[in-house]
Image: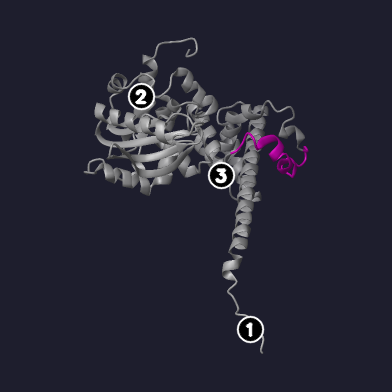
């Protein structure tokens, strides 16, 4: 009897796990290398800015002296090193040091002091990046160039913190800035809360910390003037779910759409169900394309009650209800709901409001608040 011939199998399928592991390793290594290169570039530019400022301080105080130095330096460096040293770039490096020197001035022995006098830009920079600067300079040079164009230092610091914590790309940072997230979060806080935004970024400890006023949905592509239904709005959100999660903020996980539950043989549907892992509780979102009514609030109260009594686990926090509506009425919310209700209403916009409009609203809101020892 002849031995049975083994049938050759395609190696593709058995190798899939190995391919995935190797691909993950390579992608991780590339990300790490990219981060190290970005950090080294930022630190190097900071040190170039330091040397420009120190050189200017030892030189003439005549008007135009600094401008002439930068032009001459740009020509020399471009000739000897190559691209990347235009007068504009050198101005940013100088400004970067001036604006951010406080970030590193508390270090007992600065990088500048550690560098050999004859070769200031050699290997000691890369050797000290992780120890000295990485916790402080966590963004790319392109991020910092964009941030330096924000005049309000509190606002700038907020976007710097949030970019680092949420790993915003430059395009995500620009979108959040253009949507006025700083002003929208500030409008939902007291004066102490606004100060905390600049010091710590968006810290979520209670449901109110999730609120933005308004929520911006320009990325859905729905024409503000066109006719659309609540189902159209919901479908557009599902299609752009990743961006919608970014707009909602930190800690949101999507669970379901049109979640059904039955009560006394009647079916009810929650538009969108999320879970917030920071607050450790469900977040129910109802979409209303018209004016907010007390019936909308009562319906959301029922949804929240159901989840608290039938769905929420014992170790989870109370369910949060959020109504996104075209027009909201704060007085109606206060009069309709009990004071301890965990339900909130936010207006949504299908377009990006101007930064000037949001800043004006923030100033008006700030001036209307009573002064407190904490808010002064």
**Which quadrant of the rendered structure holds the N terminus?**
bottom right
In front: mark 3 or mark 1? Answer: 1
Tell me what residue is drawn at x 52 percent, y 38 percent.
166
The local crowd at label 1, few if under 14, some if 14 to 19, many if 20 or more residues have their Cα within 10 Å, is: few
User: Residue 121 bears which disc, if any?
Assistant: none
The residue indicated by pointer 1 is 5
**Left-right relation of 175 to 353:** right
The mark nearer the N terminus, 3 or 1, is 1
Q: CA distance from mark 2 to mark 3?
A: 37 Å
Question: SS of the residue at dot 2?
Answer: helix
Tell me what residue is drawn at x 63 percent, y 59 percent.
22
The mark nearer the N terminus, 2 or 3, is 3
Whether residue 177 can be seen here: no
> Residue 135 magenta-drawn?
yes
The residue indicated by pointer 3 is 86
Q: CA distance from mark 3 to mark 1?
A: 70 Å
**Residue farthest to the bottom, as pictured:** 1
Question: SS of the residue at dot 1?
Answer: loop
- Residue 122 position in % (x across, y down): 74, 44
Residue 39 falls in which quadrant of the image? top right
User: Residue 360 bears which disc, if any?
Assistant: 2
Along the viewing direction, whichever of 102 and 279 lies nearer the viewer: 279
């Amino acid at each position: 009897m002849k031995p049975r011939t083994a049938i050759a199998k395609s190696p593709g399928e058995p190798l899939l796990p190995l391919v995935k592991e190797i691909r993950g390793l390579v992608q991780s290594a590339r990300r790490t290398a990219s981060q190290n290169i970005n950090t080294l570039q930022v630190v190097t530019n900071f040190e170039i800015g330091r040397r420009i400022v120190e050189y200017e301080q030892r030189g003439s105080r005549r008007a135009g002296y600094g401008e002439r130095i930068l032009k001459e330096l740009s020509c020399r460096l471009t000739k000897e090193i190559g691209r990347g040293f235009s007068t504009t770039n050198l101005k940013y490096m100088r400004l970067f040091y001036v604006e951010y020197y406080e970030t590193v001035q508390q270090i007992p022995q600065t990088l500048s002091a550690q560098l050999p006098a004859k070769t200031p830009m050699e290997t000691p920079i890369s050797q000290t990046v992780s120890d000295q600067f990485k916790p402080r300079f966590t963004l790319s040079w392109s991020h910092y160039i964009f941030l330096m164009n924000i005049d309000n230092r509190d606002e700038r610091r907020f976007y710097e913190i949030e970019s680092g914590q949420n790993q915003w790309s430059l395009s995500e940072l620009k979108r959040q800035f253009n949507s006025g997230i700083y002003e929208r979060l500030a409008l939902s806080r007291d004066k102490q809360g606004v100060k905390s935004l600049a010091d710590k970024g968006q810290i979520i400890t209670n449901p109110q910390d999730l609120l933005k006023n308004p929520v911006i949905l320009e990325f859905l592509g729905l024409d503000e003037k066109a006719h659309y239904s609540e189902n159209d709005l919901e479908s557009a959100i599902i299609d752009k779910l990743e961006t919608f999660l970014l707009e909602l903020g930190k800690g949101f996980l999507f669970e379901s759409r049109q979640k059904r539950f039955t009560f006394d043989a009647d079916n009810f549907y929650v538009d969108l169900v999320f879970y917030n892992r920071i607050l450790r509780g469900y977040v129910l979102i109802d979409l209303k394309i018209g004016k907010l009514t007390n019936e909308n609030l009562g319906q959301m109260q029922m949804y929240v009650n159901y989840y608290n009594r039938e769905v929420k686990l014992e170790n989870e926090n109370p369910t949060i209800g959020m109504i996104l509506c075209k027009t909201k009425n704060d007085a109606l919310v206060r009069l309709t709901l009990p004071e301890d209700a965990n339900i909130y209403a936010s207006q949504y916009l299908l377009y990006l409001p101007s930064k000037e409009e949001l800043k004006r609203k923030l100033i008006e809101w700030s001036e209307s608040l009573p002064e407190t020892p904490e808010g002064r």
